């Protein structure tokens, strides 16, 4: 019963929104993602734009640009979003960075002008970050790092290797960046799927071993989400068994060493045999012993 009473305000709010025509958007993000809530307007400094989470005001911009506040400035003593909010002064759009589970909830936007008031509600659900995927390959093999999504024209995707940008695909196909344009390390060995953003590395090397990150930004008119997918790639030397330590010698050098050892052993055995043949011990005469 207590749970029911706790849910009633939310239920009534949603019912009221439906009746009054307030636009409500479902937003699902993962921990550490960033999200931008778009107002859909470009303020002419006459509108008042206010952002709330439930009944707590977290951001505001008024006609007087000196009256702009976010989080702590709007509510003294409230530090829920400290250093994680950005307010666009031109549009009033709100960005939440490095989002956490405690940021789940109903966000309300109010745009107040001299002639009307517009309301939007964003119902935000924050889920846990999935574990990094693991790919294990032998040197010389190809590996495809899957994005897991179908890219839309306005989406952007950036692949990083150990924090170095190696590929980029944006809404403008002409801005696709691969191979030499991004990093000499992967010259002529990268293939990017323009439909999914999945990345294929051909002829893998042990130097390709490491952490790959895919940064995806999903864009639409109401909100944008920037999320990161992590992939660990392990590339092993295909010429050696994992149970035999690498001596650092080529097969030719190793064979030469074996032959040399056998020759030394043969010569040593011959010398010992020759000396043994030349040595003739004189038997003792028992009659002359005393």
Image: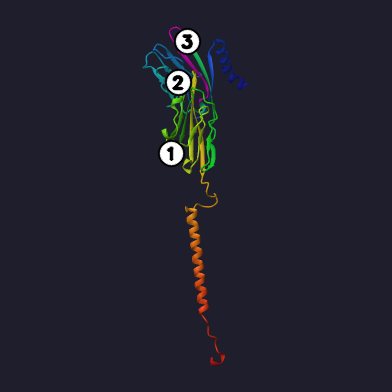
Q: What is the CA distance from the residue labelled 1 to the residue labelled 3? A: 55 Å
Check residue 29 in the rendering and tell me which mark sits there, or answer none.
none
Q: Which residue carries the number 3 mark?
A: 117
Q: Which residue carries the number 1 mark?
A: 185
Upstream in sequence: badge 2 or badge 3: 2
Up-down: is 272 above or below 149? Answer: below
Check residue 94 in the rendering and tell me which mark sits there, or answer none.
2
Between 96 and 70, the residue placed more toward the observer is 96
Residue at the limit of the structure toward the top, as seen here: 115
Q: What is the CA distance from the residue labelled 1 to the residue labelled 2? A: 38 Å
Residue 63: percent from left, percent from top? 39, 13
Up-down: is 118 above or below 190? Answer: above
Mark 3 residue element: strand
Mark 1 residue element: helix
Residue 192: percent from left, percent from top? 49, 31
Magenta range is 103-118
Is residue 245 inside the magenta stretch? no
């Amino acid at each position: 019963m207590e749970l029911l009473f706790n849910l009633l305000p939310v239920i009534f709010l949603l019912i009221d929104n439906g009746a009054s025509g307030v636009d409500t958007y479902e937003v699902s993000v993962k921990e550490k993602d960033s999200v931008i809530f778009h107002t859909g307007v470009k303020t002419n400094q006459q509108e008042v734009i206010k952002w709330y989470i439930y009944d707590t005001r977290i951001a505001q911009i008024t006609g007087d640009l000196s009256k702009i506040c976010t989080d702590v400035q709007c509510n003294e003593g409230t530090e829920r979003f400290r250093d994680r909010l950005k307010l666009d002064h031109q549009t009033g759009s709100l960005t939440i960075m490095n989002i956490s589970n405690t940021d789940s909830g109903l966000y309300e936007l109010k745009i107040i002008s001299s002639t009307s008031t517009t309301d939007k509600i964003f119902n935000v659900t924050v889920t846990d970050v999935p574990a990094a995927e693991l790919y294990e390959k032998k040197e010389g093999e190809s590996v495809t790092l899957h994005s897991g999504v179908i890219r839309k024209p306005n989406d952007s995707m950036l692949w990083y290797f150990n924090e170095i940008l190696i590929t980029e695909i944006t809404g403008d196909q002409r801005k696709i960046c691969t191979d030499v344009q991004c990093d000499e390390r992967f010259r002529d060995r990268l293939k990017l799927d323009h439909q999914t953003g999945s990345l294929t590395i051909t002829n893998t090397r042990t130097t390709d071993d490491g952490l790959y990150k895919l940064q995806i930004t999903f864009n639409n008119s109401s909100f944008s989400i920037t999320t990161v997918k992590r992939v660990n790639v392990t590339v092993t030397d295909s010429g050696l068994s994992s149970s035999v330590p690498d001596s650092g010698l080529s097969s030719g050098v190793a064979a030469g060493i074996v032959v040399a050892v056998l020759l030394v052993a043969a010569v040593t055995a011959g010398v010992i045999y020759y000396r043994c043949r030349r040595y003739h011990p004189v038997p003792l005469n028992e009659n002359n012993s005393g």
